[in-house]
Image (cartoon, rainbow, N blue to C red):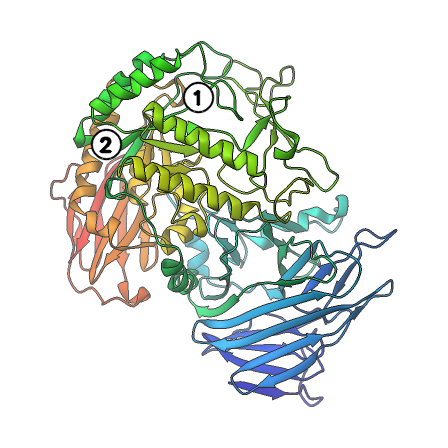
Amino acid sequence: MIDTTWSTASEPEEPGMPTSPIEWIEVRGGRVGVDTGSGALCSAALGPDGRELIGGTTGVGLLRLALPIPGYGSHFTETGTHGAPEVVREDDDTVRLTWSRLTTPHHTAPVRVEVELRSAPEGLVVRAQVRNDGDLPIPQVAFPQVLGLSAGGQDPAARVSLHASAAGHPPRVGVSGSDETRLRLSRGTVWPLRQLSMRPDDASFLETPLQRYYGYGAFEFSMKWLDYGDSRGGLTLYSRDPRYRAQGLLLERPDRARDEFALRWLHFPTIAPGSTWDSGDFVIVLHEGDWYAGARAFQEFAAEAYPYDAPPHIREALGIRSVWPAIRHAPVNFTLEELPEYAEELADPSLGLAELCVWHWWEKNGLPIILNPRLGTEDDLRAALTRCRGLGVPVSLFVSHHLLRDTDESLQEWKHLNAAGQAVGDDWTYGLDFLPRFRVPFMGTHAMVRGSLLARGMRDAILAEHARLLELGATSTCWDQYWSWFEPNYNPSADGAPDEEGDRLLDVGRAIHELVRSKNPRGTFSGEMVTEQKVPVLDYTWDWRNGADLDEDAPFRYVFPQFRLNANVNEHPRGSLLAFADGGLINVMPGQMHSHRLAEHPELVATLRQLATLRRRFLRFFCEGQYRHVEGLSTSGCHARAYSHGDEVLVVLVNPTDAPSSATVAVRPEDWGGRTLSDAPRVVALDGTPADGAVTAGYEGVVEPDGLRVLLFS
């Protein structure tokens, strides 16, 4: 429902509130106000208490265009700032804003901009279309712009809980005062009042401490979703656009003295004269409570749009094993002839390890892939893989070819070029005995340049290499840096628009996934850095993430609870316990790059066996249930995670310290719409035996150092 009201002189006016009419739109979780003078979102009020998340408007609308002109490269034009919209209110809860041109003091831009805001069951659907009727290209669009976001977290209990994680995470930045305002991304958290701050006397370059930019497709911004707010409520924004284009999220504090923030979703489409750009659908959802409600809203769309397609043995496995036959610039750890000895340790089904991933069997990154001659010959590799297959152990060969060698071996048309036409360098020279170990000042043997999937020849070469690895006997392949570069590729040889590498990356990944599965139904295609669009393509991730880091990945785990995010663990059992609690695919790496044998670490082996038994025992929660993170949990003295399966609830709690801990857990399924618990759980310890501590709807007991308890409410 839409209502139009005017601000009146008889009412005290908030700073920044518009004096032009406001279109009020009733939406899921509350209502939003649209300033008709600028087209800005000037209000986002939560229902039923009316708490305001946006503190008014300064006349800046939802869309901004970069429009470089001679002598003014940073010139831009913006809705509201450079023109008022024509406003049409439609009967079906839709507001349509139109600009036929935008005029700055330096240039009149003949661009037609149309922004549609439509109330729907899923939330406020926002979409923009830009038609470039001028003679200058438009290299960037900021849309949507949600400005004037307030910071109002005042919940003391929530502040205390933010400090209480026994595993030491998050927040990684201390939170103090009355602030618990956060921006939650799929694999990271930003605390803007603390992380986007400057002293009054700080004269830093361009005031860059007041900005954070996150490219989409890897690291924190790995899902086109965000939630801004605190434990009492927030605003979720997500995209339903299936395209994987270069884009990113800019979080900014425009004024260091004000507790207000601006979110801008940046796109890099290069809108040529005479062409049109469409944003696809964005959805804004207002909600009470923490970010979980926003994750559920995105899950309603994403679970159907991006179905997970991993083989059953990967879904069910406790983990995988990774080994390094060689480390750069050091004697080899083992030869290819010895690889089956590592595989033989995985043949024990009680460990629950699904496959063996082999790193650094190649000499250098790039194409073509060249076997490291210190490890053996291609015939040796084929023989080793045959022996592993005979042991019943699948082997995944890890490859790195998104980076190219900075030599004549790499074709110019395959290279990712920046806006100046330069190849983008990336130095991966490292070694355990260097000082420093990474990016060595006096050696550059692995100085690489970025390749681009916008080169057909490179795509064909990658597919041919993966086919060759399968022909050699590999069951699976794993792709290093499986993400599109955050910046557009301006190579004139590219066979697509500068921002389209991500779509080509997905195409090649689908082809590899199909090829691997056609050779062996147990074959997998894995890679570094998942996004929602990669969920149907990747069977699991190989990221440099630890068991404790899965806490930052909670929104992604919540939306895609069955997808296997890896967690790297060494010989210390604590990493495996934390990874198990969060449902991670445990990537077993004792000795890390030194690749110790499992037999050298009996305590780790015993822990893995116990965890594998527990996973099989409660498999329905991990493979069919819903990961809840700490939704509905109140805890102290432990690291705890909740899962639901129908009316059943599972809680895994860990004491990740060196001393006994008095742990308490209270469970409230009603927080996610479940039934209130009236009984005590069954409690089992790490070894699967019954344990004490059960109380009604929770647990109270002492947990030994690096101990674990599983609570089952059924």
Task: Tell me the distance, in whole angstroms, between the alpha carbons under discs 2 and 1.
Answer: 25 Å
Residue 579, percent from left and from top: 33, 39
Disc 2 residue crowd, few under 14, some 14–19, many 20+, Cα 10 Å: many
Using the image as rendered, state which of residue 671 and residue 454 is in the foreground: 454
Q: In this view, does 477 lie above or below 363?
A: below
Q: In this view, does 411 lie above or below 241?
A: above
Residue occupying the point 85% across, 63% down:
107
Residue 319, percent from left and from top: 29, 35
- Identify which amino acid the numbered label 2 is placed on: Leu
Residue occupying the point 63% across, 55% down:
267
With 359 as the anchor, is 337 left or right in this view? left
Secondary structure at badge 2 equals helix
Residue occupying the point 20% across, 51% down:
620
With 625 as the anchor, is 407 left or right in this view? right
Total numbered badges shown on the rendered structure:
2
Report which residue position mark 2 lands on: 608
Using the image as rendered, state which of residue 283 and residue 462 is in the foreground: 462
Q: Residue furthest left?
A: 690
Q: Can residue 136 be seen in this view?
A: yes
- Identify which amino acid the numbered label 1 is placed on: His
Q: Which residue lies furthest to the bottom in this view?
A: 10
Q: In this view, does 424 lie above or below 430?
A: below
Disc 1 residue crowd, few under 14, some 14–19, many 20+, Cα 10 Å: many
Secondary structure at badge 1 equals loop
Instruction: Place residue 666 in its image quadrant.
Output: bottom left
**Earlier sequence position, callout 2 versus callout 1:** 1
Residue 384, percent from left and from top: 30, 17
Circle 2/circle 1 CB separation < 8 Å = no
Instruction: Place residue 566 in its image quadrant.
Output: top left
Quarter of the figure that contains the C terminus? bottom left
Residue 458, percent from left and from top: 55, 34
Report which residue position mark 1 lands on: 360
